[in-house]
Image (tube, grey):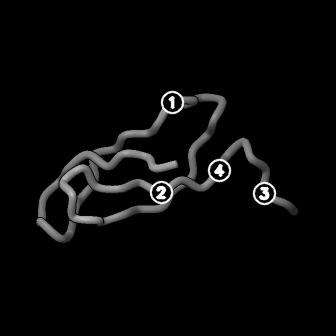
């Protein structure tokens, strides 16, 4: 079964400038703009915003 482009894989990069990343999937129909999630940055040991890269 092929993966469709409705739920693409996106890379989330830390806004703290540490280079930490997460990889997740998102639904383009429900969230057409860039995704921003507050997640744990293990390099600075605190929660920061992670923004979607394209």
Mark 2–mark 1 distance (CA, rounded to whole Å): 14 Å
Mark 4 burial class by Cα count in 10 Å: few <14, some 14-19, many 20+? few
Mark 2, secondary structure of its residue: strand
Which of the two marks, 3 or 2, is nearer to us in this view? 2
Badge 4 is on which residue?
Answer: 8
Mark 2 burial class by Cα count in 10 Å: few <14, some 14-19, many 20+? some
Closer to the chain start, of discs 1 and 4, is 4
Mark 1–mark 3 distance (CA, rounded to whole Å): 21 Å
**Residue 33 tag number:** 1
Closer to the chain start, of discs 1 and 3, is 3
Residues at circles 1 and 3 in contact by the CB criterion of under 8 Å: no
Badge 3 is on which residue?
Answer: 3
Q: Which residue is drawn at the image coordinates 28% and 55% (left, top)?
A: 14
Q: Which residue is drawn at the image coordinates 17% and 70% (left, top)?
A: 43
Q: Which residue is drawn at the image coordinates 20% and 50% (left, top)?
A: 48
Mark 3–mark 2 distance (CA, rounded to whole Å): 17 Å
Mark 3, secondary structure of its residue: loop
Residues at circles 3 and 4 in contact by the CB criterion of under 8 Å: no
Badge 2 is on which residue?
Answer: 11
């Amino acid at each position: 079964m092929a993966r469709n482009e409705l739920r693409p894989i996106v890379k989330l990069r830390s806004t703290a400038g540490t280079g930490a990343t997460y990889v997740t999937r998102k639904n383009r129909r429900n969230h057409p703009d860039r995704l921003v999630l507050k997640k744990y940055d293990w390099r600075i040991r605190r929660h920061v915003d992670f923004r979607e890269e394209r």
